[in-house]
Amino acid sequence: MADAATDSSTKAATVSKSWGDIAEEAAESSSSPTPEPEMSALAIGEPKEPKTLEDPDDSSIETATGDTPYTSAKTFEDLNLSPELLKGLYVEMKFERPSKIQAISLPMILTPPYKDLVAQAHNGSGKTTCFVLGMLSRVDPALKAPQALCICPTRELAIQNMEVLLKMGKYTGITSEAAVPTGTDLPIYKRMPIMSQVVIGTPGTIKKWISAKKLGLRDLKILVFDEADHMLAEDGFKDDSLRIMKDIERSGARCQVVLFSATFDDTVKNFVSRVVKDRNEMFVKKEDLSLDAVKQYKVRCPDESAKISVIKDKILDLGQKLGQTIIFVRSRHSASMLHKSLAQLGYEVTTIQGALRQEDRDKIVKEFKDGLTQVLISTDLLARGFDQSQVNLVVNYDLPVKHDSPNEPDCEVYLHRVGRAGRFGRKVVNGRRIGVWIYYKGSCHALGNILELLFEKHSAGGAAFNLIYDDRDDAIMQKIERHFGKSVAEVPSWESDHDFEAALKEAGLL
DNA sequence: AAAAAAT
């Protein structure tokens, strides 16, 4: 960083906005931070260097905010939200206070100069509500044009996010639209230009709308990438995402970019830092990201048919009453194979994968979310973001592997899959005030109240079973354990009901 | 070869 000795830096500071590629901005100038309405409490980030929050409770999250100070929001009132949006939060969402990641990230999203944000947070800790609230709050209700755009890796996730937006924004009158294929789409040229203020969708449809000039970008204020690491990964949607960012840039919009995910591996992290330059950051330490809320097990199976027996006799028979189950498989093909085997044996399961028709996918998701079906077989279509609080059991029928090197585990996908379980109790991630007392020389003094933040560690359990059947699986599982620095217990015998019961009991499910 | 989606 060259120390900005030049006076021209003042100008550069307010204009600097370049995710494209070139435009190197050395000037980390001291643009006068807009004065905060007093919010008190934890100061987030300190001038110049990235800093860990002082409050020991918050040491698991690291933020870097450059030289713009932010103050964490203790209440939603601290965030200057519209009364209509507040009503949505309290009445519809039943929120009382911001969750930890909301408290930290929302001021960064909502405070001028609206710096870009890269935010990592645990599965189930309320990422969606964060960026949905961010979008709703940055939209000018009087301006009837697209102002917030959210890009998601699957249409299921886009639809789910849209549902959250509709609920939270119920009283705001803010209009929205899902940019996903419906199966019965009009030819694009027959569509009217999009007037909705918030658009949430998948890359292909969004690209299509943009190139057909049906989705204007000029008034965009905020661009959100959900599951951002995947959206910017080489084998993910990198090209599409960059393309859309370039289009926005070219339109002349002053648009904030916000990236959310539970995972950012080093490759993606490096790439992000090249693409999103002048940014705030919020990261969770690797060791704190571990999947404590969900008990993980491995089950050695002598052969493929034993895997099916485990599903049938243990997971389905024992697990039925424990809530819902998602069984992850590697490919569309194995999804339908497993489905057939189980159906033949008279078990009721449903399956979702990308080759199904859109309306069937919607129906299967809806049935599962409505609790009409108990067991869902899925490809990694649902590995990320899918939120269904009744899922207590996740089974990796096939371990997640890197598609370009099948002997390597995909630890990010593993974390996301396992994160589908044990979400119950995390939906309301709230804080409550507790008194703090100190004993000194035999007498007791009140220190005052602090905010205790209730987290997913307090949530009801959940369990994940990894089915392992050869040396390769073994090696992969070992690598996963090493990656997360945590050994995964083994269910002693794949044939023993008692062993499974013990495991489920340990996970708090029996 | 999972996934999105368009050619």
Image: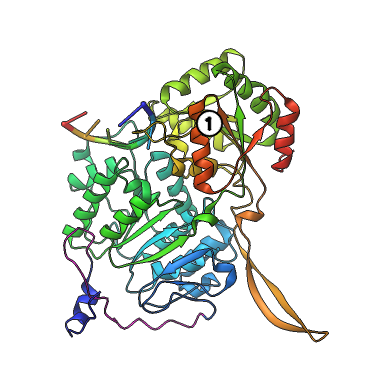
Q: Tell me if I can see residue A176 in this picture.
A: no
Per the rendered image, the range of residues in magenta is: A18-39
Q: Residue at x 16, y 65 (%)?
A: A23
Say if A217 sits above or below A296 in the image. below
The answer to whether residue A30 is magenta is yes
Q: Nearer the viewer, residue A189 or A40?
A: A40
Say if A409 sits above or below A458 in the image. above
Residue occupying the far right of the picture: A442
**In this rendering, position of residue A497 left or right of residue A397:** right
Say if A432 sits above or below A357 in the image. below
**In this rendering, position of residue A231 left or right of residue A60:** left
Quarter occupied by residue A490: top right
**In this rendering, position of residue A385 left or right of residue A209:** right
Say if A380 sits above or below A17 in the image. above
Three-letter code for the amino acid on which mark 1 is drawn: Asp
Residue named by callout 1: A474
Instruction: Please identify the quadrant where the N terminus of chain A is shown.
Output: bottom left
Q: Nearer the viewer, residue A70 or A373?
A: A70
